[in-house]
Amino acid sequence: MSEVDNAALQTQAESLLQNLKEKNFQLRGPERMAIPSQPMPAQDPQVRRHNISEVALGYTPAQAMVEANRCLQCKNQPCVEGCPVRLPIRDFISHIAVGEFAEAIALIKESSLLPAVCGRVCPQETQCQVHCTLGKALKDINKSVAIGRLERFAADWERAQGAAKLPECQPDTGKKVAVIGSGPAGLAVAADCRRAGHSVTVFEAFHKFGGVMLYGIPEFRLPKAIVEAEVETLRQMGVELIPNFLVGRTRSLQALLEQDGYDAAFIGIGAGLPNFMGIEGENLVGVFSANEYLTRANLLKAYQRGVAATPIVEAKRVAVLGGGNVAMDAARTALRLGAEEVHLIYRRSEKEMPARAEEVSHAKEEGVQFHLLRNAKRILGNEQGFVTALECLCYELGEPDASGRRSPVAVPGSEYILPVDAVIVAIGNSSNPLIQQTTKGLQFNRRGNLVCTEDGRTSLEKVFAGGDIVLGAATVILAMGQGRRAAAAINEMLAE
Amino acid sequence: MALLLPLLCSPEAFCRHNHSAGPHPVAGPENSAENMTIKPYTILYKEQLSASVFLMRIQAPHIAAERRPGQFILLSINHEYGERIPLTIADADTAEGSITIIFQAVGFTTKQLAQLPVGAELAVLLGPLGRPTHIEKLGHVVCVGGGVGIAPLHPIAKAFKQAGNRLTCILGARSRELIILEKQFTALADELIICTDDGSAGRKALVTEPLQELCQSAQKPDQVVAIGPPVMMKFCVETVRPFDVPIVVSLNTIMVDGTGMCGGCRVTVGGETKFVCVDGPEFDGLKVDFDGMIRRLQAYRSQERRMDEGHECKLSKLEQR
């Protein structure tokens, strides 16, 4: 969307808002349903594919108010049912609808600790927005109330006002909580346990805090300044944040509990071991896990060539294997790093893609070429061991499998060669074996995920867990939700 | 002849009690109380061991307390824009709370690291990483070290010796000035064999020559440990293979996080993909695909060269001003 379009959107919103004000925001249902849904202003695809700035620019106050007035304020609030943290969606939207932005964000923050993040990266179309009465009435999920965009608006509005209000903390209890990992699950635990008055220390293996929100999700989808602001809030609340500390190696979990006086520990270390395809040529130079590629680009800022010391492949033709959000992030990052062609290879059809629809369409707009019902068969290289091409195999959809998705079946003899100079493998992660290697008594399932109860209790006393190490690869909001449940259980245990 | 060599790494470098006598004293006795509050990652001591090899002792109490032979650290010298590189731990002093690293200034980051003075702080220091060496009493253990690989070999050799093994050490380098820690190995080993390519110290031979002789001798090794340049390790493996002697190698590959997250360090071992950071760094040498590993180490060679040129270029501009 060009700047001209963005200006037109704003003009249209202002005129709609004028009408709403004239009616004193008192509208009947059909009138609300008639308000056009407000598109998200965005950078022009041809411009943004060459920069790392955020793609979606966010609603203006007028656009947010107009969009909020589309909400039918349902009595039964079906949207809330779809939210992993049960955000009071209807009620915060009712505040935005009349311009009470401070009230809106205050309400959101009672349930969500990271609204600026979740507003951006939550899969609303499969959570809250899929249940929206308006979307159902208009027979188009894309016409549901844009809950995520409104959540983001409220959080961004608050940040723009200057210092956000610090959550209040109970008087010190003298109890100590160790939080291992500073991703969404860990940050949620840190905030909730600190609010209960406990002393909280967050241990992070990287040199910066935020976990996947920092190393994984690119700047153009989630600006790092937002994550840093959330971390800074925790610091101001009195949470101690220790970087470059790998629990299990720098200090064992047992030592933290038995010698260092921690009364509880939360493991939120993510699913950090990249899967590879297991095909020929996968260890050639120029084949990367998406984790490596994105970490180099995001956390280590390799996109700032000549400034960052971390090198990153300078590929002109890139293949990305996978169809999830991480695959989209890697493909779009490759464009921004100067690739002329980016080919996304996915085994099933677009309908089965686990990536958010918005990310898929953003990737397409920017010029990522989709090869659907295709899979990598082997990777070819030259004598020096550098990647030169990908051999792909065509597939067609067969019968639905156990997950309900139609499983792809290879078409014999359909191989073709795609010349590329880099291959990024984005087919998911397994759980990191480190904590398992170094902690006795923790129970893991066959896939290497930590086994724990609904409220995050593991097989070890005083040890809780949540996020991707329990769920397998999931989302920011699910990790945060698990973190909050575990924090509640920790606070309950420490109150005894 | 070997014993007449100059002492290229002073024993003081390994011991805090004498460190003020070293070439770069960090703190005199008058401000030793400040040692209590030295910031983590501070460079406490620095010594140039040869034209391109440096030794540093760095404040890192947690790592010093936990590290075991065979483990490594990951460091970076710039918080925002630094590159994270793995380096092996040569020694640690738990009383001082420091670790010793020995590195060759060959890459972009190691060259800059070598420029840092005593008192400077590293931006990132993570460790100890990797699985420690499996130490047990096996009989005759032969430790082979090449170039800066001699540094990480030292704690491993020491541990094998302490476990009651007969210890033979073979140290190799291009020339006499690149043989490090000779004094320490002389004190440690039951037998020490020094090899140089140019014959300027010890035997004029590759380390594989005495290794082969040992394998053929009555004192056939029960275990070989080889640490050094990939090519050296590869040929050590090929040397012992016909003799059915077990050999452990320690791999130093490209890493980003050092915790298993990126897979950049992966190597093929026995036909399987392994991550050096969490599965290693030590592997059964007989199973390692060295050629594949050597190729992967070339990944950023051309970019690194350009970074170097760019870097020197900027410096020379500054000098002109």
Image (cartoon, helix red, strand yellow):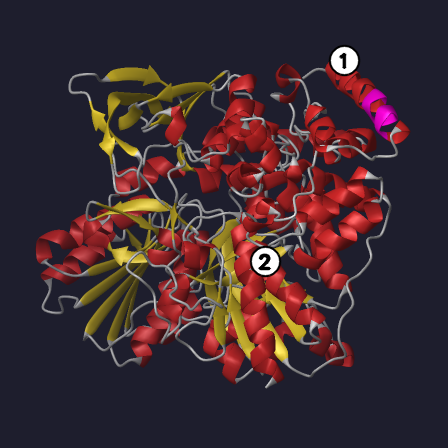
In this picture, residue A259 sits left or right of residue A399? right
Question: Where is mark 1, residue-wise?
Answer: A4
Q: Percent x, y for residue B174?
A: 38, 47
Which segment did they paint magenta?
A: A15-20
Is residue A19 magenta-colored?
yes
Q: Is residue B66 depicted above or below A109 in this figure?
A: below
Residue at (40% x, 22% y) in the render: A421
Single out the residue that lies furthest toward the right: A22
Q: Percent x, y for residue A231?
A: 69, 55
Residue at (85% x, 24% y) in the render: A19
Residue at (75% x, 81% y) in the render: B33
Label annotation for residue A276:
none
Residue B318 lies in quadrant: top right
Q: Earlier in the sequence, mark 2 or mark 1?
A: 1
* Quadrant in which the C terminus of chain A is drawn: bottom right
Between residue A147 and residue B85, name the one nearer to us: A147
* Quadrant in which the N terminus of chain A is drawn: top right
In this picture, residue A90 sits left or right of residue B135? right
Q: CA distance from mark 2 to mark 1?
A: 40 Å
Between residue B295 and residue B228, name the one nearer to us: B295
2 or 1: mark nearer the eye: 1
Q: In which chain is the residue bearing label 1?
A: A
Question: Where is mark 2, residue-wise?
Answer: A182
Is residue B104 magenta-colored?
no
Query: Disc 2 on helix, strand or loop?
Result: loop
Does label 1 lie on the same chain as label 2? yes
- Total count of labels: 2
